[in-house]
Every structure is written in C-alpha cells, then in structure tokens.
Amino acid sequence: MKTNDFATIAQQYRVIFFDAYGVIKNAHGLIDGVADTFQFLREHQIEFFVLTNDASRGPAELANAYHKRGLTAIDAGKIISSGMLAREYLLYKVKQGTLAFLGTQASAHYIEAIGLKTISIKDVDLSDSEEISALVLLDDEGFDWNNDINKAINLLRRRNIPVIVANTDERYPVSQDHVAIAIGAVADMIERVVGKTFIRFGKPDSQMFHFAYEHMLQTVHVRKDQILMVGDTLTTDIIGGNKFGIDTMLVLSGNTQPEKARLLIRTTGIIPNFICNSIALR
C-alpha cells in the first residue's frame, strides 16, 4: 500500500485539523517526532486546530498537558473538543436540576463552567434522585466500572432523563499495538441495556465539523478545499471529514494498524485522500 509523506501533503493546505489520540499523542505521551511537525507548520504558515472527541478535561487543561510534554504550539484556542458541543447543548436544553456524570472530576469542567450543579455517579443516592435532570457520559476514568455503571443503568430505569454522551469514541490507542475502551463504547452498552436513545456529540457527526469550521473562521478565512483532516480512525475522523467535504489523511500511528489498513478501507468503503505512517517528519 502506497503511503504519502506528510510534509509534502501538508504544504498543499492552509489549515489542518488534527485528531489528538493516535495522531499527536497516545497514552504514553507525544508520538515521537511530532514536536518538529508543529515547528514545520509554523515556518510554512499553515494554521492548525486539534479536533478531538476527548472530553476528559477542558481546553485549557488539555493544552497544558501538551505544554508539560514540551509541545507549546497547542494552546486552548487551538483545541476544539466534543465536550464543547455537549456544553453548548446543556447550556440551552438543561437549565435546572443536578447533572449526574460518569467521568473524572476534571471532566465535569464542561458542565460546571456554565453554572450547572453536578454530582458524580458514585455519589448518587438512587433512593433520592428526583433532582437529577440528566446523565452525562464524559470519560472512561473516575468511576468504578462495576458498581457505578450498574448504578447509572438503574438511575435510567428509575428516571426518564436525557443522556448526553460527550465522547463518541469506542476505543483509543495506548500504543502502536494496543487500544483501550473509551466512554463511547460504555455508552453503547448502557444504551442497549436500558433501551433508550442517547444524545451524542463528537466525530464523525457533521455538527462537530461545522462547529470546528466556525471556530476556525474566527482566526482564518479559508475554503473547505484548503482544509485537511488528519486522523487515525476511518469511522470517525475520515468518514466525518469526507462527509463534511474536506480532504482527509489516514495516519497509521494509532487505531488503524498498517497491516490492516488496506482491508479496512476496502471493506468499509471509507476512502481517505491520503495515507501516511505518521505526521512526524522523521
């Protein structure tokens, strides 16, 4: 399977949307060589944004995590997350009561930043849950996978409340060869058990790309044909970018393993414009 050189392709575009996990970083830190990539983008005056389904922390905290690893080019204004979309929905649609959440306390930032009261699912008393007006699924950490998932299921059996999923990812890359389950897969399981339809935010939904495009226009005005979406997953990053009408590049440094890429593209029918091993320049 023919792969492309990232630097050569990148110079054909004025703006690049990057996925985070599997493209810029994994669970162990930055992917080797990506810091040089962002220096290259700055030198060639190529604007970029990180378009991520990560709702584990707010944009400022996500940016700070990059800074601690030596990648200072990514500030809060460069990050567009599915949590921002979920926050907007909650702001206009859920105006009272307490929101229960699955995730870390840091992930509850998206809810608390708009003045809504929150409670971790582990602290919910099912016998006194009348004040809970919604359940928000934010992150795959911060709760007991047995007790608290069961509690969430029983809360939804007792209360007819909306469930908002702030991250549609079913898995994320831990390393080149291993992945871990993400909150999107937890949401799929709970949804099937309780027989309700949840409200989801994140790639590949076109709303995520429209939100990112509008955010981008505050900084730079470009046409869609001047934007490249770079991601490691066909069923979120690539299909989402394709449907939005922008060019796409699949990288083989995350969810999609190099030896399986050709088969996955053929069987899914999701075709990226380009394929490269990594965004690293070396």
Image (tube, grey):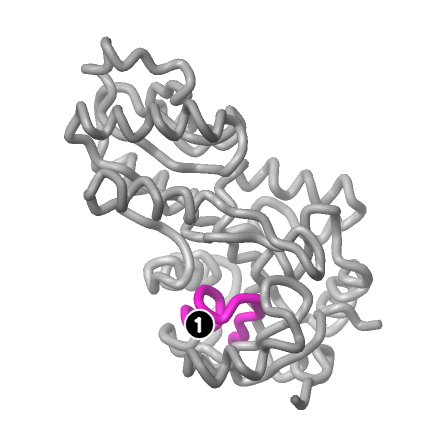
Where is residue 131 drawn, in percent x and y? 22, 15
Q: Is residue 32 magenta?
A: no
Res. 118 image quadrant:
top left
> Vertical placement of 154 versus 251: above or below?
above
Where is residue 266 drawn, in percent x and y? 48, 85
Residue furthest out toward the right: 282
Q: Is residue 114 visible?
A: no
- Neighbor class of circle 1 (other Cα within 10 Å; few <14, some 14-19, many 20+) is many
Q: The N terminus appears in which quarter of the rendering?
A: bottom right
Where is residue 276 drawn, in percent x and y? 67, 78
Identify which residue is drawn at 34% across, 64% down: 206
> Vertical placement of 121 versus 195: above or below?
above
Which amino acid is tagged 1?
Gly
Residue furthest out toward the bottom: 2
Q: Is residue 42 left or right of residue 85?
A: right
> Vertical placement of 157 versus 217: above or below?
above
Q: Is residue 236 magenta?
A: yes
Q: The C terminus appears in which quarter of the rendering?
A: bottom right
| Count of picture labels | 1
Where is residue 149 drawn, in percent x and y? 39, 30
Res. 5 image quadrant:
bottom right
Residue indicated by mark 1: 241
The span picked out in magenta is 226-241
Identify which residue is drawn at 41% across, 42% down: 186
Identify which residue is drawn at 31% across, 24% down: 99
Residue furthest out toward the left: 160
* SS at mark 1 in the image: helix
Q: Nearer the viewer, residue 267 or 269?
A: 267
